[in-house]
Every structure is written in structure tokens, then in C-alpha cells.
Image: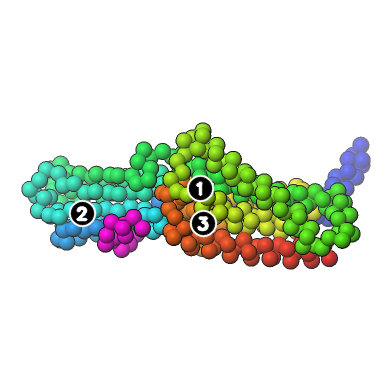
Amino acid sequence: MIQRLWAVLRKEFAHILRDPRTLLVVLAMPLAQLLLMANAVSLDVHSTPIAVVDLDHSPASRAFIRELSSSFFRMTEAPRTTVHLDRLFRGGAIDGIVVIPQHFERDLVSRPAVPVQVLVDGSDANTATLVTGFVNAVAERFSLRGAPGSGPPIALTTRLLYNPEGNTLFFIVPGLAGLILTLVSTLLTSLALVREKESGTLEQILVSPLSPLEIILGKVGPYFVLALADGLLILAAAVTLYQLPIRGSLPLLLVLMLPFVLAYLALGLLISSGVATQTAAVLVSLGGTMLPNLILSNLIFPIASMPRPLQLASLIVPGRYFLDIIRGVVIKGVGISDLIPQTVFLCAFSAVMLVISIKSFRERLG
């Protein structure tokens, strides 16, 4: 019995070692996940961009601004007009604004409470809560330091923009839509083409009069339509089941969804040309698309709080840019003028990935 069992074990190990790429994925994926999640998975927020509008320009107001300047906040330019303020928020340049009123220094002494307005981008519920809490803590500390023995004279008036109820579903659901589209788009093409290779039907297609490019476009085209249908289904379910408002243009969102879906269909094609089995295709698809988009897209964990190398790595994750698009259109109602950088990146990324994947697959076919 031992000899028979040993023979089976040797055979299985030999089979595993004959596919080093799958073995590499199985061994390298847990280590990559550990390193990525240990450094990135944190709900703490650091270097949050905020602006301060100082209408008093007094020593007390400047001292309050210095109190706000910390590792938690990163000060940016103060908006000059209401239109400029709205543009900063809609473009995602800032997460909050603190408005110090006129006569701030005088009222600290003469009035029992000085109102200080805090405007926060409510489209990111987690960041909005932390920004509000930290500004409140700074105000209390400043008040007690400046007027010991009396009650805190600064009274914060907080207003959540775009999501006044602070509904976390408005923050999570658009991100989940992008995550689901990523996974579906990649798996559809990678599994379909690898299945053809495993069953041997791909070789039958190759002997037909079709060129490799025609084969690739013919295989990818239906999944492109299905992925877009999935996108519509997800949005319809979010509106129906979770009352998610779509404040912007739905046609614009669907148009900007095209390069995002195409990028991951192309990535699925690239994966299919490099793996031999459906199991390997699933592992690579999950590890190479879902994990980066879950962690490095600003879906749950703030990118500003991550180590610098991970912040740089997030710049090539399409999910980060599509998340800006879908949250911007759905929650903030932004237009194409506010989404030009994200749109340019997605179009360029999808074009590059399509060229690379088609070239790689044609080389494999040859």
C-alpha cells in the first residue's frame, strides 16, 4: 500500500512541477497578499487635503490654522470664490474646508461661542467622519488652550456635501459596481479562451480562414457586450434596491464605462495567453485584478494613508480612476470637464493593454 501511495504522490508532484507558472502563482500569491494587505489595509486617514478660508487674518486665526496643520491634514489653497470651492470638491482636490469667520479673535473673548463652519465631502463617508471628528478635537484643544477654565468657545457647524445623511451605501455601492465589473470582465475572457485551449477546439478554429485578429475580436466582442449589460444591471439594482441617486448623466457614465471594461477584457486576454489551465486563469485573475482594485482604488482604504510605494502603485490601477468617475457622476453629479484626467488614463490604459494582449496572443497562436 505504501508503495502504491508513494507512486501516486510522485505522479501528482511531477504533474504540479510540470506547470511552474501555476506553482509560482500558488506560492507567490499568499506572500504578495500578505505584503500588500499588511501595508495598505488601514482605515486610518493621514494627509487628508483640506482648505482653510481665513476671513479674520488675525493672530488667533493663524494659530488655529497652525493647530489644524498636522500629519492628519494637508493644507491646500483656499478657494477664492464659491465656484472655485465647488470645483475643488467636484474634482476631488480637497475633502473638506474650514471657514474661520470675521472677528474670530475678538469673539473668542467676548462671545460664549464662535461659529466655525466645516464643509466636508460626504461622498466618502469614512473620511468625512474622521475629518469631522479631528477638526472637532482640534477646536476643543485650541479652545481649552486659549481659554483655560472656561467652556470651549468654538462651535463647529458641520455640513456634509453630496451625502447629507452620511449614508455609507452611497459610498460603498458605486465602488462595488467597479469591483464586480473588474472581476467579471477579466474572468469572462480568460476562462473562455483557456477553456478553448484545454478542450482542443482552439486549434480547430486556427485552421479556419479566420486571421488571429479576427479570432480575438470575435471571442472578445460578445463578452464586451455582456460586461456592459452587467454594468447596467448593477446600476439598476443599486437604484432600485438601495435608492442610490444618479445625480449626473447616465449616458456619460455608460460611455466612460467602455474603456474601463475594455481594459480588463484585454487583461483577461493577456492572462489567457500566459496560462494553461482554467484554475490558473482564476487564480491570476483574482490576484491580479480584484485584490489591487479592492485595496489600491480608494474603495475602502484611503490611498493618502498608504506608504509611498503603494501610492505610486495605485497610479496604474484602473479601478482607482473608474471609482472617481462613478462616484463623481452618481453622487456629485459631475460632468466630463471634471473627469478629463481619469478619462484620458482609462482610454490610454485600455489601448495599451489591447495592443499588448493581441500581440501576446498572436505570438502564442503562431
User: Badge 2: few (under 14), some or many (20 or more) residues near its Cα, within 10 Å?
Assistant: many
- Disc 2 on helix, strand or loop? strand
Which of 154/309 is in front? 154
Do residues under tags 3 and 1 come within 8 Å of each other at their CB atoms? no
Label drawn at residue 250 = 1
Q: Nearer the viewer, mark 2 or mark 3?
A: 3
User: Badge 3: few (under 14), some or many (20 or more) residues near its Cα, within 10 Å?
Assistant: many
Residue 9 is a magenta residue: no
Mark closest to the chain's N terminus, 2 or 1: 2
Residue at left 74%, top 66%? 359
Label drawn at residue 100 = 2
Query: What stretch of residues is rendered in magenta?
Result: 71-87
Label drawn at residue 321 = 3
Could you tell me residue 159's position as x and y percent? Answer: 30, 44
Query: How many numbered discs?
Result: 3
Amino acid type shown at disc 3: Tyr
- Which of the 4 quarters of the picture holds residue 364? bottom right
Which of 125/154 is in front? 125
The quarter of the rendered structure image containing the N terminus is top right
Do residues under tags 2 and 3 come within 8 Å of each other at their CB atoms? no
Residue 83 is a magenta residue: yes
Is any atom of residue 96 visible in this view?
yes
Amino acid type shown at disc 2: Ile
Could you tell me residue 266's position as x and y percent? Answer: 68, 58
Mark closest to the chain's N terminus, 2 or 3: 2
Could you tell me residue 122's position as x and y percent? Answer: 38, 46
Answer with left or right where residue 125 lies relative to residue 212.
left
Answer with left or right where residue 161 lies relative to residue 204.
left
Could you tell me residue 250's position as x and y percent? Answer: 50, 47
The residue sitting at the left extreme is: 110
